[in-house]
Image: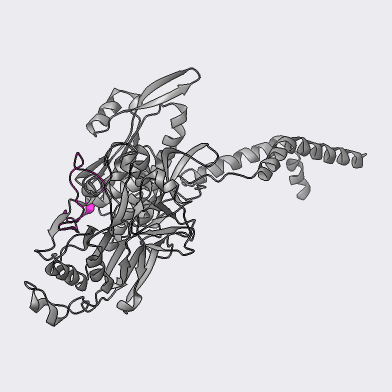
Amino acid sequence: MISFFDQFNKNRKFLFLQFFLTFLLFNLLLGDWYCRKDLSQENRFNLTESTEKILNNLQSKLIIDAFYSSDVPGMHRARLQLSKELLKEIASVNSSMIELRIIDPDSGETEKQKAAEAGIKSYPLEKLERGSAEVKQAYFGIRLTLGTNTETIPLAYNAESLEYQILTLLKKMTRKSEKSPLAILKAPGAHTFPEPGPMSGKETFGVFIHKIYGPEFGEPTEININSEPIPEEFSILLWVGNPRLTDLGRYHIDQYLMRGGNIILLAETMKFQLPNPRGGMEAMMGSGDGIAMPNPDADEFRKFTSHYGFEVKSDLLLEPERGMVTDSLIQMEGGFLARYHYPLWPVVTGESDGISKENLLTKYSSAIVLPWASGIDLLKDKQPEVKIEPVLLTSKDADRKENYVPIDENQVANLNLEPTGLNIPMGVHLKGKFISYFNKDSLPEGANVSGFLPKSKENTEAQIFVSGSPYLISDIFFSKQLYMETFQTTNMPFFLNLLDIFTGDTDLLATRTKQPYIKNLKPISKWEQYVFSVINILFVPIALGIYAFLRLRKRTRGL
């Protein structure tokens, strides 16, 4: 019997037929099995657990109409294919409730008409060839239909952000309340959020509120804190700048915290003016004789906030090696020009241990920029039932300048910086049961005496995030393209995550921060250059020599 099968095993045609049939069977079995591996360092193309949870809990059928052109320049084809592959993976999570329809508008006028009806328009893609350039109109947009609701993603080009774009719209389509949970503190001295335009500047944050936050969550409500309490319907109070608070205003903030409210405080303890708030480099770094000095109202601010366990100092922190890279050239020692790292805009990263990876507020952030930031001292004995944790820290090489600090880039470049040897907190998270700033015998006039809470309500915890920089979401980031792009991949996802966490929603945290930030390239040493050069020159000849030697030895042994 064995000899009977041996004759087939030695037959080449029979072996080839076996291989061919096995190949067909393997493809038949796995043809409907979706499989891919994300090899990117940040796992930017893997679906998060939150995404899979949301897709698996859909109550209505989701139809994804993806309009992608096939006739695109080769330099764009691979990226668009990656987006389509990600859409297929999204659809495969819950195939019974998700229908994916990929439509090619280049295949005919009917498909182009469908794209137009869905609100998808074409965008120009540049095709570069040697000695010439050609512009091709292409489609890469998506329409989502969930029940009777329809939303459009007009530009779905980058696969890294596609998951977040889809999840954001799904959350919007299923959100039960249209009212924003965010209240913004209003008082003299507080930063404002006008519509983007002539009033935008260093001390405004209108672009973030009206162009980023509002379309996703709804417009926030402004609270005149010195005259009205904060309604319980608002889960977050945003406090930006150093407003002049009356005793009643402090009482309103204090009791909001005692009821379990959450506060985001972007403190301003140093004051300065920029000569031209919207013009060129001056909008970023200042020019001329700009000097930062202590805010006149900083002492009153510290007297109130120190009760809750933190104290924002009247100083500015300078990071000599980890400042924001600008497009400004500055003359260095030796007379050569180089890109300037502005020390007064510290960039904290997870790689440098400047960002806490244990705290949920910062766990998913790769980098955060803190313009003109002050240091924060922790006073943990003030609130024994509150966990006080620094989440954004300087490096030990940072310097701390008090009182009068020049902000002009040329003056800053010539400062003698002395490392403190300390990791100074620039961002702090406080969570727990707070003790009130007031007592029954010291309530201000106009206070609601009957509703006074001397400490946090039973079974509730409040949270505070305090930043030593009041410019985390400032309109100044939008004065130049470079700074806007940096903001979109650093501070914007961090701040949106912060708002989500304070409202108890964690679905988008990992997805929102998938976009990679630009990392500084580290130069290689002369020795490393030499080693790589030798390997590059000798690797192929050595490999061929070894192969020839082994073949020759094998043949010699055969003889």
Question: Residue 158 in the image: x percent, y percent?
Answer: 39, 39
Residue in front for this viewpoint, 552 or 538: 538
Q: Which quadrant holds residue 451?
A: bottom left
Overall secondary structure of the magenta stretch? loop
What is the residue that sits farthest to the right in this orientation? 559
Q: Is residue 297 left or right of residue 544?
A: left
> Can residue 161 be spotted in the picture?
yes
Q: Residue furthest top?
A: 131
Q: Residue at x 37, y 37 (%)?
A: 157
Query: Looking at the image, is 375 positioned above or below residue 87?
Result: below
Q: Nearer the viewer, residue 463 or 511?
A: 463
Compared with 170, 552 (above or below) is above
Q: How is the image coloured?
A: one colour
**Image quadrant where residue 530 sits:** top right
Q: Is residue 268 left or right of residue 543?
A: left
The residue depicted at 25 percent of the width and 58 percent of the height is: 295
349 sits to left or right of 196: right
* Residue 541 position (above or below residue 241): above
* 541 falls in the magenta region: no
Residue 516 visible somewhere in the drawing: no
Quadrant of the frame with the C terminus: top right
Q: Position of residue 495 (x, y in %)?
A: 31, 54
Segment colored magenta:
174-202
Q: Quadrant of residue 106?
A: top left
Q: Nearer the viewer, residue 531 or 94?
A: 531
